[in-house]
Every structure is written in structure tokens, then in C-alpha cells.
Amino acid sequence: MLDKYDVIVVGAGHAGCEAANAAARMGSRVLLVTMNMNTIAQMSCNPAMGGVAKGQIVREIDALGGGSGIVSDKSAIQFRMLNRSKGPAMWSPRTQNDRMLFSLEWRYLLEQNPNVDFWQDMCVGVLVEQQKVVGVQMGMGTKIYASAVVLTNGTFLNGLIHLGEKQFGGGRAGEKAAVGLTESLVALGFEAGRMKTGTPPRVDGRSLDYTKMEIQDGDENPSKFSFGSTPALVKQLPCHITYTNDATHDMLRTGFDRSPMFNGAIKSSGPRYCPSIEDKISRFADRDRHQIFVEPEGWNTVEIYVNGFSTSLPEEVQYAAMKTIPGFANVKMFRPGYAIEYDYFPPTQLKHSLETKLVENLFFAGQINGTTGYEEAACQGLIAGINAHRKVFEKDPFILSRSEAYIGVLIDDLITKGTNEPYRMFTSRAEFRILLRQDNADERLTPLGFEIGLADAAALEKVERKKALTKQLKTKLREIGISPAQANPMLQKKESAPINQQVKASSLITRPHVTLSDLIEVNEEAALAVSEVFNSEPLAVEQTEILLKYEGYIEREEEQAQKHQRLENLSLPETMDYTQIKSLSIEAKEKLSQIQPATIGQAARVSGVSPSDISVLLVHLGR
């Protein structure tokens, strides 16, 4: 170990790995502290990355130069692009992953960086001098010093596991809770709260009858997360779908009196959008079945993750209820599901850089901020790692706006609105989701990643080539004419109105059911133009089709984003005393004093602040 590090990252989950990787790649000397070197980047819950909105986040992390996309590709066992039947703003990449391989690949990635050191111990406190962090206190008595500290503690802070009427301390099944750190932070003046999450049982895949389930294969031509050179899958493992039934629900109800969720043992908020199975049958009593996804944990294991069956009921009730599910009659359980309560710190105590307002150079990322999900944690870790490095080297913070990235939406939501239940990202949270598509994350963010020294020159060069080829193909398709004789047979099959004169290929693409593939089948010149670009950069072809088909919507959203940005450019002084602005409502004075928004745009998003309050602020600023 060095005498002093630039950045110490506490916790080696998804947030911690991204934070350590980013700061180290940018040039900081980093110490990654973990309670267990064998569980770096552990997939504590489901063995999957991405999904609706989450897949966009992984693409954004990769575009900036982070590691989650690369590791996901290298450990993938299945790839699917979700929501293909909807518009491209909703397309969301998702991988099933080999859980053990995912963890190994992250460790390899970090070990290949000479700027990363590792230390196995429990962090029990932060060292602070004159409201500035100077290091961390370890459980074995060691004090380690650094210019900046990033805390990414996951569910370990005073973690309490619930299984039926049993309770025991732990940050994860089989691993002890982290004690001392919450108390250290509260003593410094931080506000803490409690949250809850849960996980389902894991079972023996050899004991299941897959003939009683629906098969769910990966994409026929699988893509990947990373815009770099990671290989796409050539072999994939299937998942399966089955359903609960009345017998399952009746069996689960027999344990409700011993459920920590119903008997008052758990008092904290759980994830609204990922409820336990007992919560589902209680809240949605009119539904006679619930979907269960049967997901393999890896290439070389028989362990299965029972997605959709998260529970904290007694293990004998879990087991008996599972046996009533089609395909599970002879199921063998490896380990039961459980709920876990843990400490978090309301994120309104943070700046947009994820630095705490109370202690300088101290950053929080991941579930400590009240979020749920690997992807949400990873992107916070990335931003915290970037900004910890930049703070140490006296550079301005790196902040993404709501119109630049889902990452910007997530962080702005957290620090502006706070959260009293585990926060999960959805496409509906973003006002500019047509601009924030998964396919253009590289164009949006790789130049920014390169500018701050995280994305490399090869990534930037690839983006520039893709943009040039997209522009070339768009221009070509606007020039190519398609005659009625060529187009009408195809249009008739599509039940689309025929044309009575030659039209440009680009105008036909704007029709809802007409694709670029349809045009290249009926027009040789279009086929040649597409083939030429596809051979150089396949992603440029997909990008061209999206830009032409949704051009009007994209332009409209870009105009709205520019208007929005004008409010974001109006800064508010950090020292502003809102209590002295007479015309503000009492609620606005209270909320604005608590949040201390950085801009007028952020102030407008604070709950309880009305448009008239914003007008008062604009007048106060002389606007």
C-alpha cells in the first residue's frame, strides 16, 4: 500500500468497480477496499444486465469509457434487444450473464490497471479534517489516507436479513454486514434512512421439467453492449417462462402470518417495481397467475435464478409453493430467497457531481443513495470516480444534463427530488428519450469521454467514422428515386397506400411499416448504397434508418432540449438565502433552502416549487 492515495473507493460492487476503473484510467492512484476479494462485482441478485432504460445506461457507460458493457459482453450467455416492436426510443439491450464469469472479468479488468491497488477489510469510518475528507478508518485499526473518498457500500450498511421470523445481520447471504460507517457519517451530520430489497430462491436446474415451460431464446442475430471490439455471441443459452397459479398463491398465504413484510418486522420501503411474490398476490388479488422467468446462472452450473419469485417467507413455505408451479414439481432448492434491510443516505445531500454537500471530496454512489439495480449503481460509480479524480486534480466537475444522457436524468432526479423508496430507472423518467436512444449513446457521449481522458482515441475514431457513414447513406437515400413499378407491389403487401410517381427512398422510409430492408429488395441502387456502408460499419445503417424515419420527432425534441438548456444555463448562487426573497411561497423557500439547486432548471424540478416561484427567482436574478 502507498502512504497516500488520490482516491479510495470503499466497496467493490458495480458502483465501486466503475469508480475505481474510471479514476485509475484517468490517472489517479486508486485503492479499492472490499470486505471480500472473492466477491468483486458480485451479481447479488439476477444474473443479467440491461433491460428497459437500464440497457441504455450500460451503453452510455460504455460510450464514456466505463467497463460494464465490456464485462457484460465477455460474460454473456444470451442477448436480447427488448421492445423491438416499439419505436427505437424504447429499444433496450439486455444480456443474461454467467454470474461467476462476470465477477472474474471485472476483477481481470481492474487488475490490468497498474493504478489500482486492493485492500481487504471493513471500512468503519471516514477521516475528516476541517469538513474535508482525508482518508478512511479500517476495521483492523489501519488508517489509510487519500485526497478523495468514494463510498459505494451497497446493501451492507447495518444490513439485516429477514427469512420468515428469523433475522440475522448480513450484507448478503453468507456475508457479514458493515457496521460503524453509518454511525461515523451520522456523527458528521448526515441524515440516514433504511430501505429494503429482496431476492428469490435459487434452485437445481436438473430438478426442473422444462417441457412444461415456454422457451425464451436469445436474438437470432445477437448484438452486444460495447461499441468496442468485444465479440458478439455465437452460442446462447435459453431461458424459460412459467406461471404461478391458485395453488401457489394459497400455499404462499399460509405463511403470511410469519412474513416479515406483513407482521411488522420490516418497516422500511421496498422496490415498488420489483415486488416480492407475497406482495404481488396481496396487492393484485384479482390476478390468477404471475409470470416466473427461469434464468440459468452460467455456462457451467446447474444453478437457476427464479426471477419473479422474490420472497422473505419461511423457507418451507417457499419450497412448498414452488412445487406447485408447472415444471417445478420435483424442484430442489439450493438456497432460499430473503429480504434485506440496509442503511442509505437521502441523495438530496449530494451535488450533481455526487460529492456530498457536507464534507468536501467525499462522494457517494450506488445503493447508498437509495437506488436499486446494477446499472443504476454502475453509472453513479462511473460519475463519482470521474469527479473524485477531477476534484483531486482541481478540474471542474463532469456533469451530464437530462438531455444528454439517462445518467444525467438519474442523478438529477436523485439530488433534486430525493427518494424514499429504491429508485429504478425507466424510459418514462426521461423527457428527451427520442434523443437518448441506445443506438446513439456513442455519438452523444464518446466525445465527452475522450475530452476528459476516459474514452480512448480508437473509440472516438470509430464514432467519427460511424457519423460520416451515416451522413453519407442519408444523403444517398435522399437522392435515390424509387418508381411506382418498384414500390407498389411491396406497398400493397404492407397495406400501405401506393405511389403514382417516382419518390425518394428517404420519404418511403418514413412510412410506419416500411423498412430499409424492404427498399433494398425493390431497388438495386439503394441495395448497393446500403451494402457499401454495412460492410464498413453495420451500426451506421441502423442509425440512418432511425434518423430518417423519426426525423420530425427528433428535430422537435432537439428544439425542446435547447429551450430546456437555456434554463439550465441560468446559475443560482450557492449562497442564496431563499428565506429573504419575499414573494416566494413558504414551501418553495423551505424546499429550495434544503436542495440548494445549482440552476433555474433544477429549481423548476423541485417538488413544491411552482411556475410563479420560478418567475420570482428570474426577477430576483434580474432576468
Image (cartoon, rainbow, N blue to C red):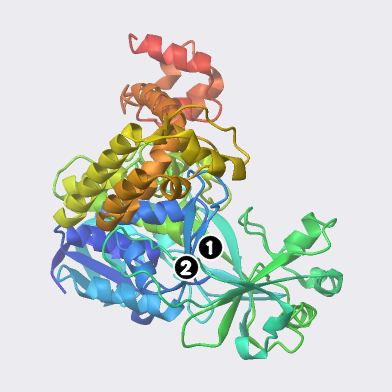
In the image: residue 31, left or right of residue 206: left
- The answer to whether 580 is drawn above or below residue 110 in the figure is above
In the image: residue 157, left or right of residue 307: left
Residue flagged by tag 2: what amino acid is it? Phe
Residue at image location 47% in from the left, 27% down from the top: 501
- The answer to whether 473 is drawn above or below residue 39 in the figure is above
For disc 1, the marked residue is 342
Pick the residue in front: 137 or 536.
Answer: 536
Tell me, yes or no, whether the two marked residues, 1 and 2, touch with CB atoms within 8 Å: yes
Mark 1 or mark 2: whose residue is earlier in sequence: 2
Where residue 306 sits, quadrant-wise, is: bottom right
Pick the residue in front: 9 or 478.
Answer: 478
Q: How far across and how far down the image is residue 146, in percent?
A: 19, 60
- The answer to whether 411 is drawn above or below residue 99 in the figure is above
Q: How far across and how far down the image is residue 153, in percent?
A: 41, 63
For disc 2, the marked residue is 156
- The tag on residue 469 is none
Q: How far across and how far down the image is residue 283, in percent?
A: 78, 55
Judge the density around disc 2: few (<14), some (14-19), many (≥20) Cα neighbours within 10 Å: many
Instruction: Say whether residue 5 is visible.
Output: yes
* Quadrant (top left, top right, bottom left, bottom right) of the C terminus: top left
Residue at image location 46% in from the left, 38% down from the top: 509
Mark 1–mark 2 distance (CA, rounded to whole Å): 6 Å
Instruction: Say whether residue 356 is visible.
Output: no
Where residue 557 sits, quadrant-wise, is: top left
* Quadrant (top left, top right, bottom left, bottom right) of the N terminus: bottom left
Judge the density around disc 1: few (<14), some (14-19), many (≥20) Cα neighbours within 10 Å: many
